[in-house]
Amino acid sequence: MLDKKNPEDEPRQKRSFIREKVVKQPLTRKQILFRAGCVILAAAACGAAAGTMFAVVSPVAQRYLGQESTEESTAITIPRDEPESSASQESPPEEVPSKPEQTEESVVDSESFEEQVQEIIANYKYTTGDFASAYAGLRDVVAEADHGIVTVHSVKHGLDWFDNPVETSGLYAGAVIGSTPQDYLILTPDGAVENADSIKVTFADGSEVDGTIRQTDQVSGMAMVSVRAEMLNESTANSLSLIPLGNSYSVRQGDPVIAVGAPGGIVHSSAYGFISYIMKNVQVPDGMTRLLLADICGDAPTGTFLLNLNGQMIGWVTDDYERDQLTNLTTAMAISDYKTILEKLSNGIAAPYLGVRGQEVSTAMEENGMPAGVYVADCIQNGPAYNAGIQNGDVIVKIGEKNILSMKEYENQLEALHQGDTVTVTVQRKSVNEYKELEYQVNVGAR
């Protein structure tokens, strides 16, 4: 009987052969260096391609996705103007040095010289060239200022009666009044940005860029729009002129003025005129202002700015203070009373608002028993002060911990507040036989 072979008894060599595996030959040094070089070159090529794509796509993505730049914006500062007091206007008399006694011969020579001058003037014949020469300087001021006038194009989207999408737009004049390394600042009527879905700004050379609403002020009827400096090409930036802000306190009756922006209802129109009258101490919400009345055409809704002969802005045309007896004159708000507000608008800060038209309590009013402070002539309906409970006829004597004795102190204290603050306003209210002190918590609003 044959015995079966046990697999364990198979030769050891056979089993070892079955387990063997093929091992790759190790790379030579030359091969290692070659492969390492290929990897480095491939990585460099991929990095360069990725960097190029990022540089190309990043600006487009930021523009369409609305990504904000992390660059910190520069704060805007506008210097204030001090009103000229009556004392400064009436300078003290100076000592006049005594004149040497004139001889009869010198008096005769003086009279003869004056007669000769008057004769030359009387016989001089003015020509159209003289007239054109006189206005050449005005044209130069207009031409320079026009480089700082832009067209603010507001776009609004809606639906018609048949639910079809429609787009409405309006054209407004804007004045470039300031700049930072990041932005150009444009003053324009608040109608240009009201309910606008987008803002376009067209510069004097025809280039158009996107604009952004910085802030609005309904009391002055103006708004601040900004344009990114990086959006302007070099040619547009070089041709752009800023319109400087002037001092409206120095304006006098009879001064010549220039209207730019859209005095004729069309952007980039202009006009000339004179200051006919200056209304001082006009009550406005939370302050007093001056109004400049000029015999010049001006379109307030589209935007009209008044300049002095130095090309400085001294005000902008408004329709909020029209009077029946002044139908032939254009009314402009004096800029010096609003430089604090313009600074806040330029920095994107809402101007604080209580909603009080007031006047200082005069000496005569105090003699009749009224306490010193600011008399509330009109507490504007639905304003912060009105909603808190302050009434017409109250006398504001304190805001916070600050005593209020004048409109200037009222304005300074309000300027230190911010929208959303809650401030204690102390008033004196007349009862049957006396004034009683009351305190109200007022939530500061925005103009």
Image (tube, grey):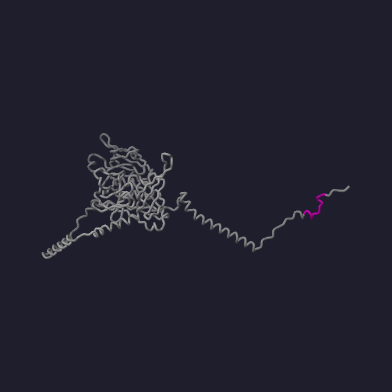
Residue sitting at x 61%, y 60%: 36
Q: Is residue 382 above or below residue 170?
A: above
Q: Is residue 404 visible?
A: no
Q: Foreground residue, 12 or 49?
A: 49
The majority secondary structure of the magenta stretch comes to: helix
Residue 152 in the magenta stretch? The answer is no
Q: Nearer the viewer, residue 278 or 344?
A: 278
Vertically, is 375 above or below 254? Answer: above
Residue closer to the observer: 371 or 333:
333
Is 10 in the magenta? yes
> Residue 227 appears at what percent x and percent y?
40, 52
- The residue located at (89%, 47%) in the rendering is 1
Name the residue nearer the viewer: 294 or 358. 294
Percent coordinates x, y for residue 391 in the rendering: 30, 37
**Residue farthest front in this picture:** 162
**Residue 26 picture quarter:** bottom right
Q: Is residue 403 left or right of residue 125?
A: right
Screen quadrant of the C terminus: top left
Q: Which residues are magenta?
A: 6-15
The residue most toward the bottom is 105
Left or right of 23, for residue 86: left
User: How far from the left and from the top, in percent, is residue 63?
Assistant: 46, 51
